[in-house]
Image (cartoon, rainbow, N blue to C red):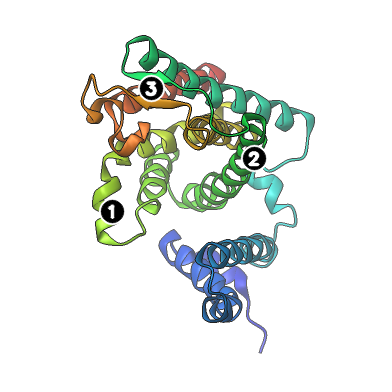
């Protein structure tokens, strides 16, 4: 019996999201289960299962677009275009994200809240390694949240409603972990919501293209990766860690929230100017 998947468009967005996630799990579990069973190295286990999950996510997006919405170019619809404009947006986003992190740490250094240290590892390797990791994270999370999820929300809700729900779900998704870990990292929730808002505004500013959000997300991750993995700073203890960042994570401190708020304000204003 042939199933007419276009009937899914008649269901509200929560039902469509659940159907998509269940279909993804149905594809993923048969491949992931043997890996969890056979692979002893937990790091390798996580990498393999996440790579498989994301490959199947991209495959399912293509099927979803063609069979549910009858759109053959669903990735372009999400804003994932391989064009010069999107490439420039990507580089611009990388520069904004990296600069934001460096200015934050630079200001804290000027205030005496942290001390810069000589790198204990080969810094060029960390920079290049961090760039690859950050672009991977930026691509994966932005296609998921500002591509597929935002599109589904905007099909049912007004733009501002979709914006708020997207930002909150983005922040909540970072707390799918054991309760102790949730409590440990809870202070970063406001900054993650601000980042979620920033990314949606960034996409709208660039007329629906994903290049800027991918680059901006990647730039923020890249800057923190270089400083954290390269062990370039050490906090002086002159101010409480709730100011600089609990657990040495700037997103879990007042300064991180202020900088994310400033970035959100600036990107939001650019989006408003574009409208006019």
Q: Secondary structure at mark 1?
A: helix
Instruction: Using the image, determine if residue 106 lies above or below residue 192.
Output: above
Tell me which corner region of the image, top left, top right, bottom left or bottom right, holds residue 242: top left
Question: Mark 3 highlights which residue?
Answer: 259
Task: Give the residue drawn at x 49%, y 20%.
Answer: 102
Would you call the spot at circle 3 few (<14 residues within 10 Å), some (14-19), or many (20 or more)? some
Q: Secondary structure at mark 3?
A: helix
Foreground pick, 219 / 247: 247
Question: Mark 1 highlights which residue?
Answer: 182
Disc nearer the start of the sequence (2/3)? 2
- Distance CA(mark 1)–CA(mark 2): 28 Å
Count of residue discs: 3
Disc nearer the start of the sequence (1/3)? 1
Rendered location of residue 69, percent (x, y)? 64, 60
Q: Secondary structure at mark 2?
A: helix
Foreground pick, 201 / 237: 237
Would you call the spot at circle 2 few (<14 residues within 10 Å), some (14-19), or many (20 or more)? some
Would you call the spot at circle 1 few (<14 residues within 10 Å), some (14-19), or many (20 or more)? few
Disc nearer the start of the sequence (1/2)? 2
Tell me which corner region of the image, top left, top right, bottom left or bottom right, holds residue 128: top right
Instruction: Using the image, determine if residue 205 lies above or below residue 51.
Output: above
Rendered location of residue 270, percent (x, y)? 51, 18
- Distance CA(mark 2)–CA(mark 3): 25 Å
Can see residue 208?
A: no
Task: Give the residue drawn at x 78%, y 29%.
Answer: 84
Instruction: Choose mark 2 or mark 3, whichever is in front.
Output: 2
Query: Is disc 1 in contact with disc 2, using a CB cutoff of under 8 Å?
Result: no
- Distance CA(mark 1)–CA(mark 3): 23 Å
Rendered location of residue 208, percent (x, y)? 61, 35
Foreground pick, 49 / 174: 49
Instruction: Choose mark 1 or mark 2, whichever is in front.
Output: 2
Question: Mark 2 highlights which residue?
Answer: 129
């Amino acid at each position: 019996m042939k199933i007419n998947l276009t009937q899914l468009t008649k269901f509200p967005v929560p039902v469509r999201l659940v159907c998509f996630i269940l279909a993804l799990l149905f594809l993923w579990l048969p491949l992931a289960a043997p890996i969890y069973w056979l692979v002893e190295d937990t790091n390798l286990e996580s990498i393999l299962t996440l790579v498989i999950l994301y490959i199947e996510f991209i495959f399912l997006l293509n099927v979803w677009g063609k069979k549910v919405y009858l759109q053959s170019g669903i990735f372009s619809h999400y804003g994932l275009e391989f064009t010069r404009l999107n490439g420039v947006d990507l580089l611009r986003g990388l520069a904004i994200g990296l600069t934001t992190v460096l200015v934050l740490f630079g200001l804290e250094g000027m205030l005496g809240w942290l001390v810069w240290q000589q790198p204990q590892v080969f810094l060029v390797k960390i920079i290049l390694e961090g760039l690859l990791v950050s672009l991977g994270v930026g691509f994966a999370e932005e296609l998921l949240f500002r591509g597929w999820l935002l599109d589904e929300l905007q099909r049912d809700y007004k733009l501002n409603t979709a914006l708020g729900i997207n930002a909150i779900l983005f922040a909540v998704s970072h707390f799918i972990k054991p309760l102790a870990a949730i409590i440990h990292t809870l202070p970063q929730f406001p900054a993650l919501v601000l980042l979620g808002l920033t990314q949606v505004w960034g996409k709208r500013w660039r007329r629906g293209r994903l290049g800027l959000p991918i680059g901006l997300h990647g730039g923020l991750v890249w800057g923190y990766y270089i400083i954290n993995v390269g062990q370039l700073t050490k906090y002086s203890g002159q101010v409480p860690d709730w100011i600089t960042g609990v657990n040495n994570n700037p997103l879990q401190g007042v300064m991180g929230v202020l900088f994310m708020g400033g970035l959100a304000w600036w990107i939001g204003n650019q989006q408003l100017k574009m409208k006019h």
